[in-house]
Structure formats: C-alpha cells, structure tokens
Amino acid sequence: LSTGGIATVDERRVRIDLPPIHVAKTTSSSCPTASYNAISSAVLNGGCQTFSPSSSSTSTHYSLRVINYRVPSTYDGISPDPQTLLKDFAAQEAAPHDGKVDVIGLLTAASMNTFATATRSAQDIHVDVVVTAGLSNSRAAGADADYFALEDEGSDEKRLGTINTVVITDASLTPAALVEAYAIAIEAKCGACADMGVCCAKNPTSLAQGTGTDCCVFLSPSGKGKDFNVVKHAGKHTLFAEMVGQAVREATSEAIMINIRHLYGNYAIYTIRRWARKFAAASKGARPCIPPRPMMPIPSASLSVVLMGISSVSLAYCMPLPGRARLLLGAVAWDRYLGEPPLRWHPVCLAGSTISFVLSRTPEKVFQNPLLGFGYGLLLLVSMIGIFISVAILFLEGTNMAAAYGTKCISNICTACSDTVTAQIFDFMAWILKLLLLKSTLSIQLLCTVSLQMGKFIERKQIDEARAQLSWLCSRDPSKLGIGELAGATLESLSENLSDGFVAPLFWYVILGPVGALGYRVVNTLDSRVGYRGKFEWFGKPSARLDDVLNLIPARITAVLLAAAAVFVSGCSARDGLITAWRDCSQCRSPNAGWPMACMAGLLRVRLEKSGEYCLGSHNAPDANSIRSGHSVAQLAAGMTLLIAIIATSVVTPML
C-alpha cells in the first residue's frame, strides 16, 4: 500500500500489516516510533484506540495488524464468541519474529474475492482504502430492526453480507479531524451503495446505506513535528476529505460490483432482480407509519406504491369482466395502494358526524325512557338508511348522466374528436367516482397496517405507543393493558373488523350492489356509535339488532375463510380454529363477533380474553409473532373473499 502497509488476501481473510512509524529521536522521546490512532466499529479492539508499538520493535517487525476474517457458514455467533474467535485466529496468523502485534479484528461472511483497494495522494499525504463487500444483509438507515434488546444486538446473529472498510493514512489527524474523516468514510460508503442501486433487504423500495453489520476502521499515525503532515480539519470542503471520500467510494463500488458479478453473473441480471423485488414490495400496498392517534394525518405512501395503485386501478377498468366485478376489483386495488379518500367527504365519516349531531340535539329524557328511546332510535335508523341510500342512488345516476352529457357536449364542440374515445374517457371518469363510493364502504389495508404497527410497538416494548395506537382499532380503555392484552385486543379487532369492514360489505355488494354495501356501512356505523348497553341501550337497540341480522352470514363466512387461509400460514391450525369457533363463539354478547375472534384464537393457538366478558381459546397469551401470523391469515382470507365476490358478481343479477 502507498502508506507502507502490506495487504494479503486468501479465501479466509484479508490481513493488513502496518509497520512502525519511525520518527527522529529526541531527548523527550525514549522510543523512535509513533503510535497509531484508530477509530472503528471493529469486533476486536474497536472504538477509539491508541496502539503503541513495542520499544523493541525493529524495522522488520509490524506493530499493528488489521484482520478481516471470513466466518464459516456454520458459525452461529455464539460458540465461540466473536472476540474469542478473532483472538484465536490472530494467534494462528502470528509469526515467531513478529514481536508485539496489536490486532484489530473484523468479521464478515462475504467472499474474499470481493477484495478491492483504492489509493489517493496529494502533497505528500497518502490514503489507502481496503474493502470487502456482501449485500445479502443490506439495510437502509431506520429500517425495521431484527433485535430489540438495546444492550445486545443478538447473540445468535450471523454476519451475513457485510461491507467492511479499512482506511489508512500517513497523515497525523487531530482527534476532531479523525472523527470528521471517519464520518466522510461512512458517507462515501453510503454514496457507493446508492451509486450501485443497492436496495434495503427489509424494504426494497428504499435504497440501502450499507448492511446491518458493516464495520469501518480508520487509522492515522499520532505525532507532531517535521516527521508528520498534520491534518487539523477533515470537513467535506477540504482536500483530505476529497481524497478519503473518492478512495472509499471507488473501492466500495468495485467490491460491490465484484459481489454482484459473483452472485448474479452480471449487473443487468442484478438490475432485473432488483426491480422485481421493488415490484414485489410495492405490490404489498401502502404501509405508511400510522400516527399514534386517530384523525392525525397519515404519511403518504411511496411513489412506487402510488404508481402501482394507479396502474392497478386502470388495469381493473380494462379487465374483461362484468361491470360490477371490475368496479369491485378497482375499489380493492384503490384500498390496497391509494388509501382512504379525504375524511371530510368519506361517507362513513359523514354518517358518524350525522350521528354526533343528532345525539347532541336529542333530549336526555329520550335515552331514559325505553319506549321513547326505541322509537327515536328506530326513526334515526330508518332516516339515515333512507337518506344515504337515496343520495347514493342519485350519485350513481348522476355520474351516468354527467358522462353522457359530457360526451355529447364535447362532440358538439369538437367535431374532429372521436366520439368513441370521448365516451370512453367520460365513462372512465364516472367509473372512478363510483369506485370511490364503493371504496368508502370497505377497508382492509389500513386495518392490517395498524395491526402490524401494533406488533412493532409490542416487540420493541413501546407500551405507551401501543396503548395510544390501539385507539385506531377499538374503543377499549388501554391505560392498564399489558403486552399480552394489547396483542390480544389487536387480534380481536383484526378478526372482527375483517368481517365488519371487508367481508360483510362485499357480501352485500354482491347481492345489492354499491347501494347495498353503503347501506350496510351506515347500519354498522350506527351500531358502533349507539349499539351499547347503558345510556344508549334502548336508543341503539334497533341499529344493533339490524346489524346483527346483516352480519349473521358474513361473520360465519369470515370464520370459515380464516380457517381456510390458516392452511397456508406456517404454525397455524385450521382445525383448531374451527373447533374453537364452534365451542367459544357463544361467549360474546354479540351473536356474530365471537365467530371470527374465536376462530383466530384457535388457529393461532392463543387465548383472547376481555376481563369479565369472554375468554376465547385456551392457550398462552398472544405476542408480536401472533400478530404477524394473524396479519398473514387475515390478508389471505381477504384475498379469498375478493376472489369469491368477483366470481359471484359475474353470475348474480344486479338488483339496481
């Protein structure tokens, strides 16, 4: 190397031997050799270190050694522990004439064939960079963690593809400059990852800034005077930072390219695979970080997901399916990728606002008198169903009339325009409006996203955040709930709302079209607001009883679909789900809610309970892993529901 070190490489390791740095002997210096200052994230002798060579070292002896050791594929990260493993290997590398040798040790599982170097020099200052790179462990900064104990990154960790970087300079850096230069090296590595299009393994729609186990070592001699070039500043505007950044970026890019060619053959195949992973990630739908409390703005989905949504909705319009099947497919695609329409225009939110307005104007004596309460509640139920269904019918007819009128106007204004193309454009616009109406009656993606977010909070032991997040799913008081109870409430809401928010709307859409789905949602919203015992017991009874009737079949269909989906999810039991649903469903006050909740408890082999109300299942309390499994089952059940509904809409004669 230009700095005087020697780098050797074989299939097991990269070894860099640095010689002692000789300086002019002075009366205040008993040893004519300087020390090395190091800052690193190395496994062995990492951190901020000063390495001083032995006073007996000669010019033929090396004072410092950096070893980048490739662990075998069978290494479990436990036996022996990483530091002992590196010390033993360093002892094997030692030669009888070495004398005192300090060792900085790094671990990787990347092939030593990815070894790459780069050098920069200017004004008698040299910078050498040595890199090995693997990509299977790529991560973006802030990506979901794999280990959640802050004091330990996981004893069973396997150092998969790792980017290990060693930077050596013969310039003497001040402590502040050494930290600046180390940061430059890290940023240059991140830049190389971006240049090569390395994607995060956790979320392929994001670029990675490295891997989860990267190490970087920066070495500089410690000394002053005429024997050293002293660097006091290493910010990005300095020449030294330019040298470090360019050398690290070049060596890292070369190492990554070698790794890509080793794994994929050439960069073109890697690019195709990368885009395929991005497509697969985007196809999972919008998964933004949900705010901790309802009514707070939800962060937008990534551009790739939005583009996927636009493409999916457009494709649904062009599918060779009956009109109602295309509309349903488009609405579900919108829900998956494009999220909820604005809350101020959302029919369910409008229904909720209407209920709040009526309740604020209703005399208290109505709630206290059973006969008056029942009568007023029935009047509210009939009025809201009538109003919302009437508006929906007018809206649907209005879109058809507007499309026909628009086509006619354009044809009269522009005689050169094709009537067929114009009609198609207006028909598509009308279809989108109908789609939005139908979309407002169903929701599955937001439910699943919130459930996953709950799982993340629970596995990270962020109990306060999980308690606040639970308000997105249910009205239960979370202030005293522990981890098991929070996980249980999440699974209960996931299974029950799968029935209420997706299966039931699709069921009534198949029978009665968009108006049927909207009518159901109005009744369901009324039940969720006033269908409780206590103050609203008689006032909400008409809504609660009608909701029970409307959910009678969908709730049982949901239980069957959950059991069917469990067949395809590892660790779940469809048989236990059906048995538990049949045995425990009657524990709930609702004649319907117990079916999907008990089935979920059984198929996950967990216990879902609400103190003083019910205890579904007879196994252990659920945890974050239970939520992830339940999420997978719910997603598959929703997919089955959609497939059945599309087939049904192709054969059921619309009633409107």
Image: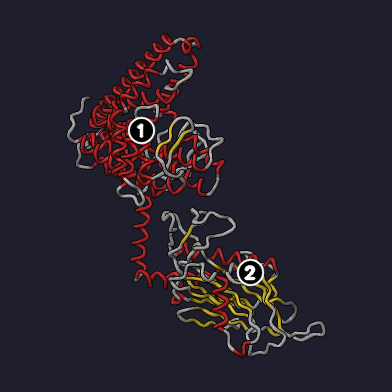
Sequence-first tag of 1 and 2: 2
**Taking the image as drawn, is residue 422 in sight?**
yes
Q: What is the three-letter code of the residue carrying label 1?
A: Cys
Q: Of 302 and 475, which appears nearest the observer?
A: 475
Image location of residue 340, percent across then percent down: 40, 36
**Contact (Cβ within 8 Å) of mark 1 with mark 2:** no
Disc 1 crowd, CA 10 A, few/some/many (<14, 14-19, 20+):
many
Task: Residue at 53% x, 40% y: name it.
Answer: 482
Residue under pointer 1: 585
Residue under pointer 2: 39
| Comparing labels 1 and 2, the label whose residue is closer to the camera | 1
Q: In which quarter of the image is the C terminus?
A: top left
Q: Of 155 and 503, which appears nearest the observer?
A: 155
Assign a secondary structure to mark 2: strand
**Taking the image as drawn, is residue 440 in sight?**
no
| Position above or below: 258 against 330 | below
Assign a secondary structure to mark 1: helix
Image location of residue 404, percent across then percent down: 24, 28
**Left or right of residue 34: residue 279:** left
**Quadrant in the picture for residue 59:** bottom right
Task: Residue at 34% x, 19% y: name it.
Answer: 385
Q: What is the three-letter code of the residue carrying label 2?
A: Ile
The residues bearing labels 1 and 2 have C-alpha atoms spaced at a distance of 62 Å
Q: Of 466 and 27, which appears nearest the observer?
A: 466
Disc on res. 573: none
| Position above or below: 273 against 390 | below
Q: Of 263 and 418, which appears nearest the observer?
A: 263
Task: Residue at 27% x, 44% y: name it.
Answer: 315
